[in-house]
Image: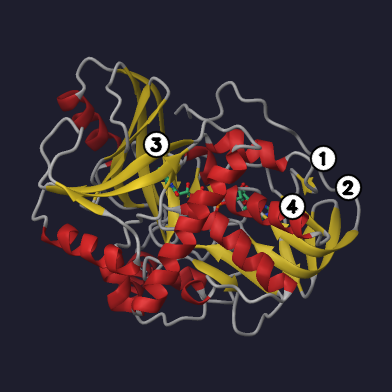
Amino acid sequence: MEYLWDQSVQRPSFPALREDTETEVLVIGGGMAGVLCAYRLEQAGVPYLLAEAKEIGGGVTKGTTAVLTAQHDALYTDLIAKFGVQKAKQYLDANLWAVRKFQELAKVYPCDFEIEPSFMYTRADPGKLKQEVRTVNRLGYPAEFQEKTRLPFPVSGAVCYPDMGQFHPLKFLYGIAKGLNIYEHTFVSRLKGGFAETPNGTIRAKKIIVATHFPFLNRRGLYPAKLYQMRSFVVALAGAPDLHGTYVDTAQGGIYFRNYKNLLLVGGGDHRTGSKGGGFPAVHRFVRQYFPRAEEKYVWATQDCMSLDDVPYIGQYSPATPDLLVTTGFNEWGMTSSMVAAAVLTDRILGNSSRFADVFSPQRTMLRKQLWVNFGTTIADMALPVTKRCSHLGCALKWNRAEHTWDCPCHGSRFDYHGRLIDNPAMRDSKVE
Ligand SMILES: Cc1cc2nc3c(=O)[nH]c(=O)nc-3n(C[C@H](O)[C@H](O)[C@H](O)COP(=O)(O)OP(=O)(O)OC[C@H]3O[C@@H](n4cnc5c(N)ncnc54)[C@H](O)[C@@H]3O)c2cc1C
């Protein structure tokens, strides 16, 4: 696997924590979410530290396709059905604000930001997309229905948001991180009260933000029940056309696109981590059919946390922990969601009311169909009579033939051939040999 975004960018480096220390706010995790929280705290003049286990931007953020849009798969017609008009509008306004905020910051931190239309397309019945356009117009954004796109195959319809964006995620992240109070190679192994334990010192903080992609405290907030992970597969092609926009298929596991300079990024084949699904073969089949002369320059896969109701969890970690905050469950839309999280959590720390917070509250109902799917998956998996078990909650690990890793189908932790930890929520290696 070779990622696109970490090629030829200068990575800033930060020291590791070497002694006990204290601060007002500790941010744990240096992906897009954690670094934006740190940036916003810095802007607000709040004393803070960010602790990153490895290197900033080296987690899921390195594998994103970095499309900036308020047009998330959680189509607004569904959001209204689940949450009502007011909260659906809050979600839309939050993400539109986030796109404009990236645009503003890109003037200060060069990151190849471009305004592009974003499209959600279908090759099936377009009725749902036509309804979606009416819904989004009603919520106040001028989405348009189109029957033709620049995609190399006919679609039956597409929803266009005319002025969304795309950027280079690591150029942006490294730019805003310079000068922030960041410790790299500082793994937080345990939280107790306001104390965070790391290998070389304890950090005492009044408030703690967990921005570790999958939250690592199992006993609070029920995150192992309300999250699962979805893997997705991307290739970057030279010699493929410029599609002048970003595109996502509404079908499960469908194909998505964006250009970056002379490359076309083609992604898809999504499936639950540890389960079977399209994977790289689905993406490669598509590329052979529609771009047979294109040359594959980069290829990678990564995964994101999916919530029960297609809306991220941003706010108080659990009802009993007022000083412990969380941001997770980005449903493969973590760029604008990270910007929203930084605003919501910083407002909360400052004691300001937030016009975006309500819809993202982690304390909202868990009674969604996906909860039973998650329970069913876990119960079936736990019952398997195998010895290779995940160090997180003891689920049976599945061998991933395509990527040569041991994957947990329940919560999405991944380990290499020798059992060394690759992806959380597991916090340590697993015994697989
Ligand atoms: C293939 C793919 C394409 C995507 N494309 C888009 C897109 O086009 N647009 C969009 O909006 N979103 C997209 N997403 C989603 C987006 O990339 C993610 O939601 C986002 O990058 C997640 O950022 P994060 O900061 O939460 O996680 P991460 O980037 O994973 O950061 C978490 C950090 O926490 C650190 N950490 C973990 N545990 C600890 C600990 N105990 N102590 C200290 N540090 C710790 C990790 O090392 C890591 O650096 C995509 C996702 C996928 C899978």
Mark 4 and mark 2 lie on one chain; the one further toward the N terminus is 2
Q: CA distance from mark 4 to mark 2?
A: 12 Å
Depicted 168 relative to depicted 345: above or below? above
Q: Secondary structure at mark 1?
A: loop
Q: Nearer the viewer, mark 2 or mark 3?
A: 2
Depicted 295 relative to depicted 112: above or below? above
- Identify the residue at horizontal 80%, vertical 52% (top origin): 199
Q: Position of residue 70 (x, y in %)?
A: 40, 55
Q: CA distance from mark 3 to mark 1?
A: 32 Å
Q: Position of residue 209 (x, y in %)?
A: 68, 64
Q: Position of residue 121 (x, y in %)?
A: 21, 47
- Residue 15: mark: 1
Mark 3 and mark 1 lie on one chain; the one further toward the N terminus is 1
Amino acid type at image mark 2: Arg
Amino acid type at image mark 3: Glu
Depicted 404 relative to depicted 398: above or below? above
Residues packed near mark 4 inside 10 Å, few (<14), some (14 to 19) or many (20 plus): many
Circle 2 sits on which residue? 18
CB of mark 2 near ligand 1 (< 8 Å): no
Q: CA distance from mark 4 to mark 3?
A: 29 Å
Residues packed near mark 3 inside 10 Å, few (<14), some (14 to 19) or many (20 plus): some
Circle 3 sits on which residue? 403
Mark 4 and mark 3 lie on one chain; the one further toward the N terminus is 4
Q: Nearer the viewer, residue 432 or 236?
A: 236
Query: Residues at badges 2 and 1 in contact (C-beta under 8 Å)?
Result: yes
Q: Is residue 17 left or right of residue 147?
A: right
- Residue 51: mark: 4
Q: Secondary structure at mark 2?
A: loop
